[in-house]
Amino acid sequence: MHRHSTALWRAATLFLLCAAPGLLGQSQEASRTPGAQTSEQSISKHLAALKARGLPRTLSELDEYYARTSSSMAAGAAFLKAFDALRNDRDLLGLAKAKLPGPGSRLPPAELKQIKECLEINAQCLALLRTAAGHRFCRYPVDLTSGLTTKLPHLPAIKKAADLLILEAVYSADTGSGTQAGEALQTALDLAASLNEEPMHLSYLLQTAVLTRTCRTLEWCLGRCAMPATNMNHIRNRLLTFLPDRTYRRALIGERCMGIALFESAPSTFETVVGERSPGFRQGVENYRRAGSWTRDYQSYLQVMEELDTIQTLGPREKLARATALQQSQSVNKGISDPFKVNIVSAMLLPAILRNPEKELRRQTELCLALTALSLRHAKQTGDLRAWANELETGTALSLPPFMLDPFVRKPLKFHHSDNTWLIYSVGPNGLPDTPKEDGGAGEMTTDDIRCTVRL
C-alpha cells in the first residue's frame, strides 16, 4: 500500500533520481566528508535515545507494541465478522454522503425509505457490531513487520460500518426512537475506540473522522428526539475517554518505526514503496546513497520526528507556531535541482503527518463542543440553565470542567444564544472569535471558528 507517495511527489522524485547518474560526479564526495560521519553519529544517538525510553525502533518491536492478547484478538475477530456481514455497501456509500436536513425539516420520504431498506438488509451486521463493541481492547490481525507496504483492509470496512451506524442513528432520531439512536451512536464511538491501540497514522486519521462525524450527528439527533439519560451518560463517558489523545502519540511512534525501517532497508524496498523499478531510478537511488545524501536525509527525518514529540508537550499557541515553522523548514527542498541536496525520502514521509498538530486540536475541539452541548442539555433538563451559562461566561480554567475549555487557547469556550438556540464555539487556529455576535453584528467575513449549534 503506497500510502505516502502522491503523484506529484512521485513525478518529482523520478525526475531527480533519474537525473542523478549524470550528477554523481559532482556530489559523491559528500560520502567522504566529516558531515556524513556526523550524520551517522546523530542517527545512532537518536536510536539509542528511543531505546532508552522503551520505544519501538524496528518493525518487529512495533508489531509487539500493538498488544496481542487473546481478548484483543477476539475483539478484532468480532469486528471483522461484523464487517463481513455488511451488505449493499454501494447504496450505503451514496446515503452516507447525503446532507442532514436543516432545523425543523424532516428527511425526505424517499430517503427515509432507502435508509430503512439499507438498515433492514444489514440487521445482522448491526447486531454483530453491537456484540463486538462490548470488548475493551482490540487488535486487528495486521502484520506491521511489512512496514510501509502493510495492508490495512479493516480501515475502509470501519468507515462503511460507521456510515451504517450513523444512518441508523439519523433514521431512528427522525422517526422518534431516541433509545435506538443513542445505541447506534454509542456503537459508533465504540467502533472508533477499536483503533485506540493501532499505532498507524491512517488509523488515527480514520478514528478522528469517525469521531467528528459522530459528534455532529449526536447534536442533530438530540435536536430531533428525546434520548434517555442512560444513553447520554454512556456517550458522554465514552467521549471523555478520547480527550487524552494517546492515539495520536501511538500514531507518531508507528510512523517513526516505518520511516526508520525504510531508511534502514535495501534499495529494493524503496523501489517497492514508490512503485518504480526502472534502471534509471534504481541507479539514481544507489547514487543518492553513495553520495551520503541518504544518511543526511535519515538524520533530518529523525530530527523532525523528535521535534513533533516535543511539540506535543507545548501549549496550543506555541504548538501551532512550532508546527508551522517545522512545515516551512521542510519546504526548503523546493527549487533545488541537485538531487543530492534534497531530502527525497523524508519529503515523501513527512508532509501528511506535519499537518497533524492542528488536526489534533481540531479533534479535541469537536469532542469538547459535543460534551459541552450535552452539559447544556442536562442543565436545561434540571432547570439550571441560567447558572450553567453564568459559569461558562465567568468561569476560569481552574473552575470549569476541562471539556469546557477551548483547546486552541485554553480559555472557556464562547457562546451566545437567542431564544432556544445556543451557539457554542471555539476561536479556532487564529485565536480570534470570528463568529457573529449575539446582538446580530457580524464578525469577520471568513472564520476558522469551530461551532456547535444546540436547539433546546
Image (spheres, helix red, strand yellow):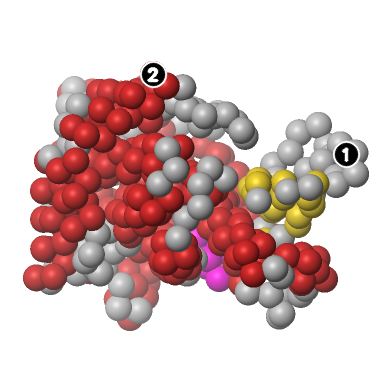
Query: For the stretch drawn in magenta, what is the main secondary structure?
Result: helix
The amino acid type, in three-letter code, at marker 1 is: Gly
Q: Residue at x 46, y 37 (%)?
A: 174
Residue 77 sits above or below residue 100 on the image: below
Residue 346 in percent (x, y) is at 40, 45
Camera-nearest residue between 302 and 451? 451
Task: Name the image quarter holding the N terminus.
Answer: top left
The verdict on residue 213 being magenta is no
Instruction: State which mark lies toward you, 1 or 2.
Output: 2
Q: Nearer the viewer, residue 2 or 299?
A: 2
Q: Is residue 422 visible?
A: yes
Proximity of marks 1 and 2: CB atoms separated by less than 8 Å:
no
Spatial separation of the CA atoms under disc 1 and disc 2? 37 Å
With respect to residue 23, does 82 lie above or below? below
Magenta stretch in the rendered image: 307-313
Q: Secondary structure at mark 1?
A: loop
In front: 342, or 387? Answer: 387
Locate residue 283: give its quadrant.
top left
Percent coordinates x, y for residue 111 in the rendering: 39, 23
The residue at which mark 1 appears reads as 440
Instruction: Report crowding for label 2: few under 14, some 14 to 19, many 20 or more residues within 10 A (C-alpha).
Output: few
* Image-quadrant location for residue 317: bottom right
